[in-house]
Amino acid sequence: MVGLMASQVPEANCAICGAPPFPECPHEGDRLELALNQAWERWAWMETIRKWVLDHARNQVITTFNEMRAMRIEAHRNYLQTLPFYTLYHRYNGAPPLQPAQLQLIHSQISAANHTLQQGVDQDWRTSCMQYPQVLDYYFNLVSIRLPPDDHPMISDPRFGAPKDPPRRVKERRESVEYREAPVKEHRKKERRRSRTGRTPPPVPMPGSYR
């Protein structure tokens, strides 16, 4: 039989509608996407892992930020207590009986302190958000998932149908059975020989009395 040229090697038609391979129709790709989505639904626990990691990472980042912000607010309050006239300012709810220059000074100092506090809070939040990759990796590493390598026999040679070499296995099994049965048969044969040749001869009949 004359071989086919490279340009003459037939291409398979569409497995869904039977259309020619060129131009390519979308049916096979659509069905593959559908099968993948269905398989993903069967593996929905992966989505549960994703949500679990995300929730814990977000809670950890927010908790860390709240702790940092609380420390800044505490430092901010302690600083305000050191300002001149602040106790009087606080007692009169921001309208103390002070000279205009003194009141302007306390206002500017409080405004500057509040601005510094806001900058610090923003910086703490940025720092906390920058930790997301590390925190996510931490929680993902707590999940135990083992994927076999690509050269593993289950990956390189998956068995979705019948075994590749069933006759060989049957033959090997038959040989092992024959090997086990051979000594038994030989033993029985020797027993039969021994029973034929090694049996004790019957006693010679004694002559009886003649009448």
Image (cartoon, helix red, strand yellow):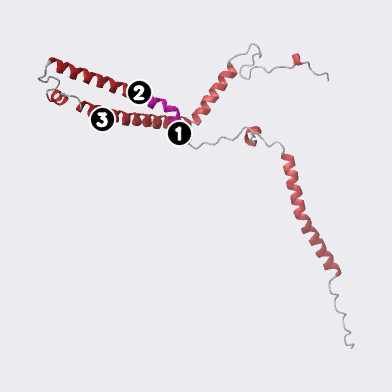
User: How far is the residue under mark 1 from the one under mark 2?
Assistant: 23 Å
Q: Position of residue 152 (x, y in %)?
A: 63, 36
Circle 3 SS class: helix
Q: Is residue 140 above or below residue 209?
A: above
Between 199 and 108, the one nearer to me in the picture: 108
Q: Which mark, by number, is residue 83?
A: none
* Residue that appears at 23% across and 29% down: 78
| Residue where numbered disc 1 is placed | 138
Residue kind at label 2, given as amino acid type: Gln
Q: Is residue 49 above or below residue 187?
A: above
The first of marks 1 and 3 along the sequence is 3
Q: Quadrant of the N terminus?
A: top right
Could you tell whether 33 is left or right of 182 in the image? left
Could you tell whether 110 is left or right of 10 in the image? left
| Residue where numbered disc 3 is placed | 74
| Residue where numbered disc 2 is placed | 123
Specify the segment rendered in magenta. 124-141
Q: Residue furthest left?
A: 97
Circle 2 SS class: helix
Q: Position of residue 31 (x, y in %)?
A: 56, 21
Residue kind at label 3, given as amino acid type: Glu
Q: Position of residue 160 (x, y in %)?
A: 63, 33
Q: Which image quarter: residue 13?
A: top right
Could you tell whether 204 is left or right of 86 in the image? right
Residue kind at label 1, given as amino acid type: Tyr
10 within the magenta span: no
Between 16 and 53, the one nearer to me in the picture: 53
The first of marks 3 and 2 along the sequence is 3
